Image (tube, rainbow, N blue to C red):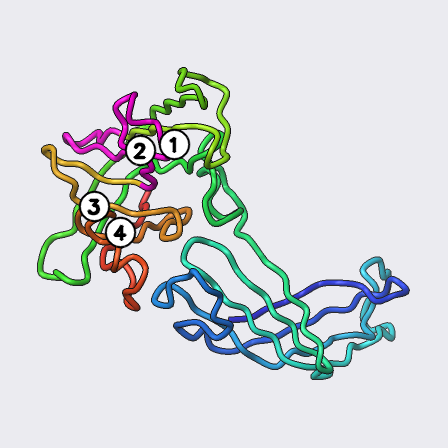
Amino acid sequence: MVLVVMSFDEVGRAEWFTASGPLTPGMLIGTPGHDVADAAYLNAPLHRLSGGPSLDSREQLPAPVPYFTAVPIGTVTVEFYGHGKVRLDLRHNGQVVTSTLTRFNFGYGGFGRDEFLPHVACWPDLSGEWVFVDRSELALPARRYRLSPPQVRAWNQQLVPTNNMRCGFGDQTHDIEYRDQRGSATLRCRHTREDSGSIGIDPMTFGCQLIEAGQVVYSFEGLYTQLDRIRAWRGTLSENSERVLNDPEGPPITGFRVR
């Protein structure tokens, strides 16, 4: 992996920072609440590149063009998490500067800007063609689904249907459904309030489940989802509640968006 930070010094001259090295599975920073099995990090010396030509330089070779110098100044750790967030730690002269990087959103909904982000206003857009593989049963063929654009339903705090989507966990009840265009499967995602059982949705449910023939095949939550990948459990989230929190290997099923 190669990291390049493009910046300027205090008087406006170009000043770049670089680091490179292997991308290592696991976590070095160890941010709580993240799946160790779905993380990777770079830990490498950080170099400052300075003294080169300015960005608006008109000089051309073989004229004398200033050449940059590269000086090691510290260490950088870049830690990647499965849901799309990146933590960056720069360590220089005993000081640590921490920042969070997020993946650019190319129109597939909100994942990549935060840990759990919206489609339209509150949910990711998981439509498209997905292939799911199960590392615990590699002899089985992969499952393939073509999910249609979602049907989004929302209710306000009084449980009255609304089109004014809000994302606060206590503000609304949401029910999002994707139909499989190749078969009878349905992907249903839910975020509900405590009293939402009166509209036929189990109170306090959160996450998504893939249903075939009335049975939950896979289930997953926001932390195991990013733009083009889903990490899922076999069965319901409630059946896997202990594993979701404590299994160091993380979810055994991985879905990839292929188109």
Q: Residue furthest front?
A: 195
The secondary element bearing badge 3 is classed as loop
Residue 203: assigned label = 2
Residue 193: assigned label = 1
Tell me the magenta residue range: 179-207
The residue indicated by pointer 4 is 232
Residue at 31 percent across and 46 percent down: it is 258
Left or right, 15 with respect to 123, comes to right
Q: Amino acid at mark 3?
A: Thr
Q: Position of residue 143 (x, y in %)?
A: 17, 46
The secondary element bearing badge 2 is classed as loop
In the rendered image of this protein, does residue 181 appear above or below residue 208? above
Q: CA distance from mark 1 to mark 2?
A: 6 Å
Q: Are marks 1 and 2 in contact (CB under 8 Å)?
A: yes
The residue indicated by pointer 3 is 236
Residue 240: assigned label = none
Residue at 38 percent across and 47 percent down: it is 222
Q: For the residues carrying marks 2 and 3, which lies nearer the camera in this image?
A: 2
Q: CA distance from mark 4 to mark 2?
A: 22 Å
